[in-house]
Image (spheres, grey):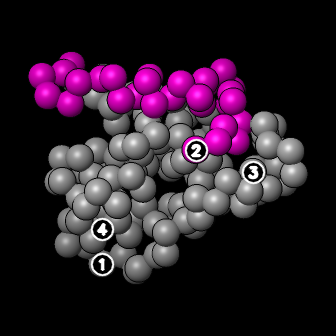
Amino acid sequence: MMPIASTLNGVDMIRLRDTVLTAPCFGGTAGDYPWDRWGKVAIQAGLDADLANLGRSVFREAFQHDWSDEQKVECGWLDGGQTMIFQALAFPEETAARWRYLYSADNFGDDPYADAVSTDPIELATALKEKGIPISVIL
């Protein structure tokens, strides 16, 4: 993915994958699993704590419950959650609805279906720019 924003509030978004996905999933330390690291950097990058916690939950569940590869990619397992952070900052309501749906569907809940949130770099960059978030993309 092209770097839409190279840094957000001191979070190196280009190296986020290395920061998050180098934590062990098995035999790791409580509080230092990939989903924990993602939750911490998501808050630092500017996500509301509740939205970051919801994102952390789907990041974790995608791995622990062996969701489909497509859903794992949607939940950060390819890029370390970079796209998730951009989506949550650009489209917070839509992203929250999607994450609630994914979590609910996995746990036999009854949250309504929510479409996947855009991963188009130009749509994300445009929305981030409109919210006053500095981007690395020339529009």
Q: Determine which residue is flagged by label 1.
A: 110
User: Where is mark 4, residue-wise?
Assistant: 104
Q: In this view, does 88 lie to the left or right of 4?
A: left
What is the x, y in percent for residue 137?
Answer: 80, 43
Q: In the current view of this chain or complex, which residue is farthest to the left?
A: 27
Labels 2, 1: front one: 2
Q: What's the residue at 23%, 65% (across, down)?
A: 106
Helix, strand or loop under label 4: helix
- Is disc 2 surrounded by few (<14), some (14 to 19) or many (20+) residues within 10 Å? few
In the image: residue 8, left or right of residue 50 = right
Sequence-wise, which precedes: disc 2 or disc 1?
A: 2
Nearest the viewer among 3 and 82 is 3
Q: From the image, tell me which residue sits under label 2.
A: 1
Identify residue type, mark 3.
Answer: Ala
Q: Do the residues labelled 4 and 1 touch (CB within 8 Å)?
A: yes
Q: Circle 3 is placed at which residue position? A: 125
